[in-house]
Amino acid sequence: MFVRELTLRDFRSWPQARFTLSPGTTVFVGRNGFGKTNLLESLFYVATLRSHRVSSDAPLVRTGADAARVTATVENEGRELTVELTIPAQGANKATINTRPVRRTREVLGILRAVLFAPEDLALVRGDPGERRRFIDELVAQLRPLAAGAKVDYDRVLRQRSALLKTASAAMRRGGEQAESVLSTLDVWDAQLAELGAQVTASRLAVVRQLAPFVTDAYSSIAPHSRPAHISYRSAAGESVDASPGGDAEIDAIRDVLAQRLVELRSKEIDRGLCLVGPHRDDLFLGLGDEPAKGFASHGESWSFALSLRLGSVELLRADGVEPIIMLDDVFAELDVTRRRLLAEFTASADQLLITAAVPDDIPESIVGRRISVGVTDDDGPRHSVTTADEMIGEFPETSEEGEA
């Protein structure tokens, strides 16, 4: 699998750009602040419908523009598909596949599979549970595109139920018909939350079980003298969910547990105005030996674990029958010599490897391929230019602004 062409319009710092790419290695080199990361972010968005940097889509639209557009032509074993995503500053996204509009944007999931390594990956080990939930959901979206729909529906129900809980306390104090109406409405939302939450949780559990051995193997190769690494799922609903047996009955079993917990926690949820159980409260447990990695892992161990999660993701996607494109966003600058070498060796077999670097010397000598410089050259004001020795890759208007790295 590889991306043959990438076109951007009003995405992040890029007013417009068109890139012709090829299999093998491409390195984007330029100082921080000139938009290298934005290029990889746009492809990751095509693969997952998520940014790896922000939780909402609004920052993806260039300041002053109505919408951002990302178009990617992907080749996979002789089959070519072109995805175009329109990301408005406000409102719902739109998508086409080979110029044909699709009913739901998530229908593009699975066309491009990608794994992105970034400096932010350290937060997978040291950060909040939300970082690890996002990591799993990104994998679910690529491996089980249909399951992504359940997550979208779950988030919608969660917002509605949370809004009701914020007003429920006052209604319950007043009593009477208003209290009865609130409780009746909560029953409806509880049923939907339990059903959709079970689907989301079951998909996550299945992916974590598949991913776990790959992460353990990757960590042992990166840090052979460290404690063994392992991962597992941690549900806010309790260990009975974590230990669910899988298979066709798993969703029903998880739904029953979630429904029961919602009943048990209803009074507390009304008092606090928060939904206290469901996959939005779950976590991915990362362990080193008998201890959790968070709080106990050294800086080097934390980086090794973060790399292992990404390396394991590559192997999982490969095991599913598709070679993903691999993107390295200035990660060599964060790694010591040994980890740089190991990462270079691992990515050498990728169908397509896209790398960004602020300092060319950070890239191991074993990595060779096409290099594209990214810079601002206009004396009258900042302007992006993307060139190789023999061709202009992107063209930009005189009024374009310098953007984020």
Image: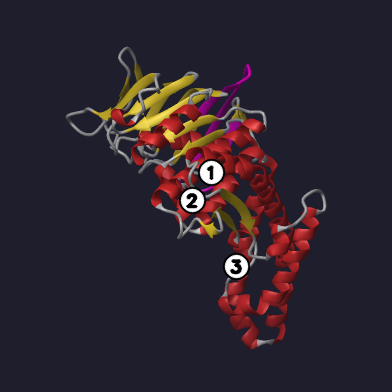
Q: Say left or right for 393 vs 214.
A: left
Please say if the residues under marks 1 and 2 sit with CB atoms less than 8 Å apart: yes
Q: Which residues are magenta?
A: 71-96
What's the mark number on residue 124?
2
Q: Residue furthest left?
A: 379
| Residue 55 visible in image | no
Q: Which one is in front, 361 or 321?
A: 361
Q: Say left or right for 9 vs 379.
A: right
Tell me the residue that label 3 is attached to: 162
Tell me the residue that label 1 is attached to: 309
- Alpha carbon separation for disc pair 1 and 3: 32 Å
The amino acid type of the residue labelled 3 equals: Ser
First along the sequence among labels 2 and 3: 2
The amino acid type of the residue labelled 1 equals: Leu
Residue shown at 56% from the left, 77% from the top: 272
First along the sequence among labels 1 and 3: 3
First along the sequence among labels 1 and 2: 2
Query: Image quarter for residue 289?
Result: bottom right
Residue shown at 38% from the left, 41% from the top: 62
Mark 1 or mark 3, which is nearer to you?
Answer: 1
Query: Image quarter for residue 82?
Result: top right
Disc 1: CA contacts within 10 A as few (<14), some (14-19) or many (>=20):
many
- Alpha carbon separation for disc pair 2 and 3: 27 Å
Please identify the dominant SS of the magenta region.
strand
Image location of residue 386, percent across then percent down: 32, 24
What's the mark number on residue 187?
none
Image location of residue 332, percent across then percent down: 37, 35
Image location of residue 152, percent across then percent down: 63, 51
Residue shown at 48% from the left, 20% from the top: 24
- Alpha carbon separation for disc pair 1 and 2: 9 Å
The amino acid type of the residue labelled 2 equals: Leu
